[in-house]
Image (tube, rainbow, N blue to C red):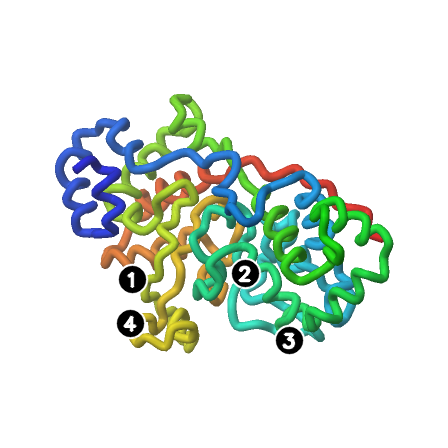
Amino acid sequence: MTPGILLRTGATALVLAVGATALHAGDIAEYMDFFEPLPALPPIPAGNSLTAEKIELGKMLFFEPRISGSGVISCATCHNPALGWSDRIPTAVGHDGQVGNRNTPTVLNSGFLESQFWDGREPDLEGQALGPIQAEIEMNMELGAAIRRLKEFDIYHEHFAVAFPGEDDPIRAENIAFAIASFERTLNTPNSPFDRFLRGDEGAMTSQQVDGMKLFVDAGCVACHNGPALTDSNFHRFQLPGSTDEGRFVVTGDDADMFAFRTPTLRNVAVTYPYFNNGSVDRLQDAVQLMGQQMLGQDFSDDELDSLVAFMHALTGEMPAVTIPALP
């Protein structure tokens, strides 16, 4: 087996075995085989082709607060472009000041994920898009009311007609989801120092970041944080002290999923704090140490932590250039 194939078995012990043998020879190329650069775009589903018209409409809807019960909350309220497309608070604040029980995941590179939300309750961005609009604790608006609100504006009739040509009544729930998902698929961060390093630019990362990459593999972090988005999109048991969030069990009812959460992407992790499903950890160093203890059964030294954190800073890519739309 090649390291890459071995990795995709998800068997941490096997990855560690590789790290204990061939990889300790110091061959950077063998470490690099565990990773792949982030493509410019994620996979595009057959049922929702990516068009400029859908993207533009989706951007308008993403920033549109009038599809919320209060008229002041939009997708961008919690997924703020200035804050790593998240909100940098422990758990989201939504309608009427209600505080949720989970941290807001960044929408950056979300098209590369195999499921959405911490508990994976939606398989794709189309499924995810409408949930926050309807959630009482988030935007708190019934879909029928949101559609009626959009139909009050001629410009939305024009944009939906262009984005979904040939439809008699294109302002409908499915198309809202298609448009928002299309826009979100463009929110990607390629060309990070790490990506440039993987493509052959040896000076793109510092020596400390390279050391962190090696340790990331040798310690076994790469068993779960792999693929272009540095997540296996699988679910792993991880219970934070004092947390009663049952994770994926709420979705499946399977005892094996109790306290299990989807592996978060490490892309842009240095700018998407605080960390974990309840946002209880502010510092990246502390988050890395906690992961080492709970998932790998080890404490990293200060030097090791510094190297791992330096490597994670190299995962910050170029932010998407998005002009805030002028809404009707």
The mark nearer the N terminus, 3 or 1, is: 3
Inspect the image, locate mark 4, and give the three-letter code of the amino acid beneath it: Ala
- Which residue is at 30% across, 46% downward? 222
- Which residue is at 70% across, 61% downward? 172
Left or right: 250, with 102 as reference point: left
Tell me residue 97's x, y (percent). Answer: 68, 73
Image height check: is 175 above or below 36?
below
Mark 1 touches mark 4? (CB < 8 Å): no
The label shown at residue 256 is: 4
Mark 3 lies on residue: 136
The mark nearer the N terminus, 1 or 2, is: 2
The mark nearer the N terminus, 2 or 3, is: 2
Provide the secondary structure element on which disc 2 rests. helix
Tell me residue 327's x, y (percent). Answer: 81, 51
Name the mark nearer the viewer: 2 or 3: 2
Residue count near mark 3 (Cα–Cα under 10 Å), binned few <14, some 14–19, many ≥20: some
Name the mark nearer the viewer: 1 or 2: 2
Mark 1 lies on residue: 294
Residue count near mark 1 (Cα–Cα under 10 Å), binned few <14, some 14–19, many ≥20: some
